């Protein structure tokens, strides 16, 4: 570990911990074995702070902050879990489940899905907000891969890995709110993309069944992520 | 101890949850020691009893008959259990919600039909605009997700309920299990 810059001392869940300059609350919590649930976060990619699952309470702060994007400050007192945070996180999961058509039972990623696993971890037995049932398309134009917008949670891991690791920047986000959609190139069919190298990194980092390999049936799409820390190290930590 | 009255109900689902219930195998003997199965697609009773202690409900609410039935079941039941993903989330039956009702009916009864095409107006109950999970229609007391929930899960939940306890669902099952 590089001792670069100033060392900060702070409290997480009542424990005294120290952080290097520029470290986030999430990084320091994980270094100290304190678990904070995440969904859009993936080690080796830039942070986005879009899923809000890692929200933590900071003493003196009027609002909750995402642990993945918030840098440690001297004397900070962070609380990573309490009944209110648990309830908020559960509700975030409900909102994600209700927003599109996840239908776990017939999903390629059934049993391998991060959203589904978090639901189980939080004891989510049902969704109290009304399911939206939006009519979302699938793009089957690529030779090897499929994007199923019904199962996309807009975590943007695909966008980040394609831009930061593969260097292709095929993926991006279009639209806002419930109309937001990941797009390839200038919203063209994936199979016609000139920038896509067909490396499949986006598929492997996708937390749900939104991106999957053709030919995979229900529950067959287990994602392989071993390449990411390896590639990050090979690039000297640079993105 | 007085035997409890147990019912099972089949709405818009594939009967897989009932099959999974039967998969408890010989443990059914432990169930019938504590409960009488007073109404179910598995027994030949046509009328729902005036009072039922526990009702396991499989399936989503997809048509007019489902809607009437679940309201009637709720009225006469103490503990209503949403059994399986169709009851809990609308699941596969709910996938028609992506389309308008008329488009769904046309696809089923006109577009792909070679002879005597036409939407039936008798015998088959009219479908609702939208398939809904049970708890959007009536109050649900226990949720058991899974497609289907395993026989072990169903037996655990049922045993707890028959012993007068509320089952702890944590780590027992999940959506799509």
Image (cartoon, rainbow, N blue to C red):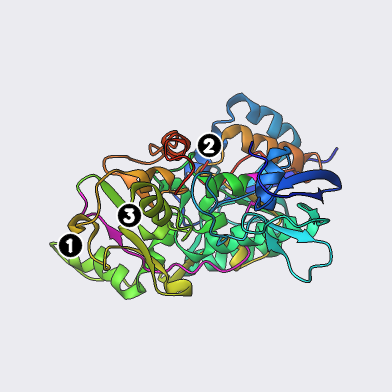
Res A217 → quadrant: top left
A119 in magenta: no
Q: Is residue A104 above or below residue B30?
A: below
The location of residue B42, given as percent across then percent down, is: 53, 42
Spatial CA distance of label 2 from label 1 is: 34 Å
Asked if badge 2 and badge 1 are on a common chain, one would say: yes
Q: Nearer the viewer, residue B74 or B40?
A: B74
Quarter of the figure that contains the N terminus of chain B: top right
Residue for point 44% across, 37% down: A225
- Residue under label 2: B20
| Chain of the residue where label 3 is placed in the rendered structure | A
Left or right: residue A72 versus residue A191 is: right
Residue matched to label 1: B113
Can see residue B53? yes
Badge 2 element: helix
User: Residue B61 or A170: which is nearer the viewer?
Assistant: A170
């Amino acid at each position: 570990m590089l001792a670069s810059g100033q060392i900060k001392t702070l409290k997480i869940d009542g424990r005294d911990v120290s952080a290097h300059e520029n470290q986030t609350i999430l990084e320091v919590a994980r270094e100290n074995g304190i678990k904070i649930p995440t969904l859009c976060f993936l080690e080796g990619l830039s942070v986005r702070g879009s899923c809000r699952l890692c929200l933590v309470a900071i003493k003196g702060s009027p609002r909750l902050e995402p642990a993945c994007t918030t840098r440690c400050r001297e004397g900070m007192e962070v609380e990573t879990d309490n009944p209110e945070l648990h309830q908020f996180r559960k509700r975030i999961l409900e909102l994600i489940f209700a927003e599109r058509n996840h239908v776990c039972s017939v999903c390629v990623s059934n049993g391998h899905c991060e959203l589904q696993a978090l639901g189980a971890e939080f004891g989510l037995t049902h969704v109290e907000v009304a399911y939206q049932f939006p009519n979302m398309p699938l793009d089957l134009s690529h030779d090897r891969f499929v994007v199923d917008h019904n199962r996309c949670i807009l975590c943007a891991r695909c966008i980040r890995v394609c831009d930061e690791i593969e260097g292709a920047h095929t993926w991006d986000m279009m639209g806002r709110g419930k109309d937001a959609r990941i797009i390839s190139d200038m919203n063209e069919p994936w199979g016609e993309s000139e920038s896509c190298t067909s490396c499949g990194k986006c598929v492997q980092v996708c937390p749900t069944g939104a991106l999957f390999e053709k030919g995979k049936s229900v529950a067959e799409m287990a994602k392989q992520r071993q390449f990411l820390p390896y590639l990050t190290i090979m690039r000297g930590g640079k993105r | 101890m007085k035997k409890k009255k147990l019912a099972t109900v089949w709405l818009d689902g594939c009967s897989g949850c009932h099959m999974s219930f039967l998969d408890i195998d010989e443990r059914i003997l432990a169930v019938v020691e504590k409960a009488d199965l007073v109404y179910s697609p598995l027994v030949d009773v046509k009328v729902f009893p005036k009072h039922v202690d526990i009702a396991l409900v499989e399936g989503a609410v997809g048509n007019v008959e489902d809607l009437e039935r679940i309201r009637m079941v709720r009225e006469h039941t103490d503990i209503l259990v949403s059994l399986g993903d169709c009851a809990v989330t609308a699941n596969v039956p709910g996938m028609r919600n992506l389309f308008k009702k008329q488009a769904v009916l046309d696809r089923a009864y006109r577009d792909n039909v070679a002879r005597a095409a036409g939407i039936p107006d008798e015998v088959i109950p009219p479908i609702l605009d939208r398939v809904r999970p049970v708890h959007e229609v009536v109050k649900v007391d226990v949720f058991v997700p899974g497609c289907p929930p395993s026989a072990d899960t169903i037996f655990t939940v049922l045993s707890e309920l028959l012993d007068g306890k509320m089952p702890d669902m944590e780590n027992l099952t999940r959506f799509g299990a």
